[in-house]
Image: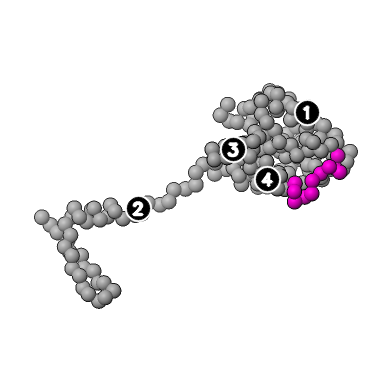
Amino acid sequence: MISLVAVLLLTTGVLVVAVLRPQALLATKAALPSEAAPAGPAPATATDPGIEYEFDVFLSSPMSSLDEANYTAHRDGLLKLVRKIEERCNYRCYYAGRNRPTASEFEAEDVALRNDLRALRRSRFFLMVVPEQRVSSVWVEAGIALAMSKSSVYLGRTDVELPFVLRGAARSTHPEIPRIRMYSYRDIDEAIKLIEVNGRSLFDHTT
């Protein structure tokens, strides 16, 4: 039977010659750590089984960036949208403006951030409604939802243009990017109709 000779020079300077049979060599190689390339990142999923979800939909829409009159009118429309989601989809919605009819009832910025992050983390889906082109925290929340791999729906008025990265994410089919859909609407009634017609399928691609 053919044997292999291995010559090892130890740190002590002692020369060691070992005779290994082929079977022993194979057994030694099998015991070594695998040299296979590390697996790539797991595909993004809509839900994380490690999270206990308190809400189904996190609704993000401008608040503090609107003046008082525009905020009140916009909030009234969003409350109708929330009711439609809750009735049609039987989903639980988080909307920071639900119990804040006026700007004077807004939380402090840092408190609002902590509360929104907690709610977003505990929501299955992200919904952004943008009534006009303006600087707003909705873009930040959309970026956080993207980083959290939340399946998302972007609703923007017909003249609203998404930031470059969000637009690219919405068009991407890469497995590391969560599923994102974007739609345009002329008024809040059309957005509500979108929910009425599509129901849960708008948010959850498995239904």
Which of the marked residues, 1 or 2, is nearer the chain's N terminus?
2
Farthest-out residue, right: 69
- The amino acid beneath tag 4 is Leu
Residue 203's spot in the image, x, y percent? 63, 31
Give the Cα separation between the discs numbered 2 and 4.
40 Å
Q: Amino acid at mark 1?
A: Lys
**Which residue lies at the image location 84% right of the left edge and 36% below the top edge?**
101
Please tell me whether residue 89 is drawn above or below residue 2 in the rendered image.
above
Query: Which image quarter: residue 72?
Result: top right
Q: Nearer the viewer, mark 2 or mark 4?
A: 4
Q: Chief secondary structure of the magenta span?
A: helix
Judging by the rendered image, the residue that carries numbered circle 1 is 80
Q: Tell me the SS state at disc 4.
A: helix
Q: CA distance from mark 1 to mark 4?
A: 24 Å
How many neighbours does mark 1 have within 10 angstroms: few (below 14), some (14-19), or many (20 or more)?
A: some
Q: Is residue 36 left or right of residue 56?
A: left
Q: Which mark is residue 117?
A: 4
Report the colour scheme: one colour
- Range of residues picked out in magenta: 102-112
Residue assigned mark 3: 52
Amino acid under disc 3: Glu
Tell me what residue is drawn at x 64 percent, y 33 percent. 56
Query: For the point 64% across and 38% down, which residue is it?
Result: 123
**Residue position marked by numbered label 2 in the rendering:** 34
- Crowding at dot 3, Cα within 10 Å, few <14 / some 14-19 / many 20+, comes out as few
Residue 93 position, x and y percent, is 70, 33
Label 3 to label 1: alpha-carbon separation: 27 Å
